[in-house]
Amino acid sequence: MATPAALPPLPFNPSRVRSYLMRLPLFTRLVLLVILAFWLLELQTIWSVVQWGSLTPDEVNLGTMYRLNTFPFIHTGFFHAALNVLALTPLLERFEAEHGTLTSIALFVGQYGFADGTFFLTALSTFPAGLYLLFEKAILHRNTPVVGASVWVFLLLGSEAIRTYKSNPHFSLGPYKIPTWTSPLIACVVLSILVSNVSFLGHLCAIAVGYLFGLGYLKIFVPPEKVLRWIESKLNLLGRLPHYISVDQKTFGRYGVLPTSNAAANANGTPMSYLATAQRVGP
């Protein structure tokens, strides 16, 4: 009797993937959960989640400013959502580990504005959305809606590129030395060439805001650590919330260990194995 052929080995170690997912910090988990929830909602045909929450220039007014915050969570299909999740997870996980959970919430989904809730301002959501609206509607006079978490992917890549540039100004590509800060721009161009129906303008706006954040120009939107410590101690967030990253934890790294050198820090470079797409839902 012939022996059945052995199955080929998996391209990844399931135990390592499970271990990595179990270590994800709180805010990263919540973002992935919301993306999943919106994708599941889009499966029904009674109400269009994309039409409700996409960043559509002609639909944005004082009564629909929520679109500036909802569009990164919404996707147009399973593969669009899956690719964005694969690209965003390691970047967002690293950001939260370095800045803390409360700071991440304030920068990505924290809300500032009028008391009646008609205006929302989050530096890492509203700013790239605002730039996109400025160029798309006011300058180009178009009305192309966009959705997708790749706005955060390219924003975080831009921020990482600026930080990497400070310690490693160039990388070699054959005989050429290319400035490190240009790597997100190169990825943006390549992705726009290889993948159809992506928002090149949306990605550029995200990279621009990422550069500003990496250069420190958006520090005004980072909550003071004294305030964060008071909130954490008052609500006992570290004791009550699993996978929560406190201000003190993020100061010394997730496990309380200070990196020994810049080289060690750079060894954990920005994952760029997956690049997401900001799906254009218009023509």
Image: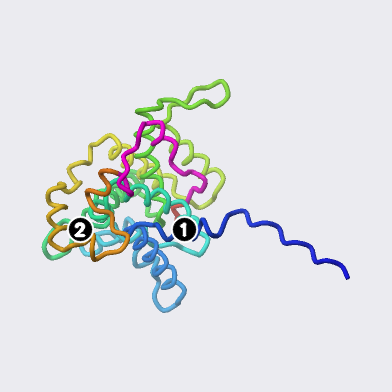
Residue nearer the viewer, 116 or 219: 219
Q: Where is residue 84 in the image (x, y as percent from the top left)?
A: 46, 55
Callout 1: SS? helix
Disc 2 crowd rating (10 Å Cα; few below 14, some 14-19, many 20+) is some
Which residue is the site of mark 2?
Answer: 111
Callout 2: SS? loop
The label nearer to you, 1 versus 2, is: 1
Disc 1 crowd rating (10 Å Cα; few below 14, some 14-19, many 20+) is few
Residue at 22% x, 41% y is 218
Residue 19 numbered mark, or none? 1
Q: Where is residue 213 in the image (x, y as percent from the top left)?
A: 28, 40
Residue nearer the viewer, 29 or 238: 238
Helix, strand or loop for the magenta stretch, by majority = loop
Name the kind of residue labelled 1 in the image: Ser
Residue at 37% x, 61% y is 29
Magenta stretch encompasses residue 257: yes
Q: Give the range drawn in magenta.
A: 253-276
Which quadrant of the view contains residue 111? bottom left
Placement of the N terminus among the 4 image quadrants? bottom right
Of all residues, the one furthest to the right in this rendering is 1
Horizontal arrangement in the rendering, residue 198 relative to residue 249 (left or right): right
Residue at 28% x, 43% y is 252
Residue nearer the viewer, 227 or 55: 227
Q: How far apart are marks 1 and 2 (CA)?
A: 33 Å
Q: Position of residue 241 (x, y in %)?
A: 27, 64
Magenta stretch encompasses residue 260: yes
In the depicted structure, whether residue 31 falls above or below residue 98: below
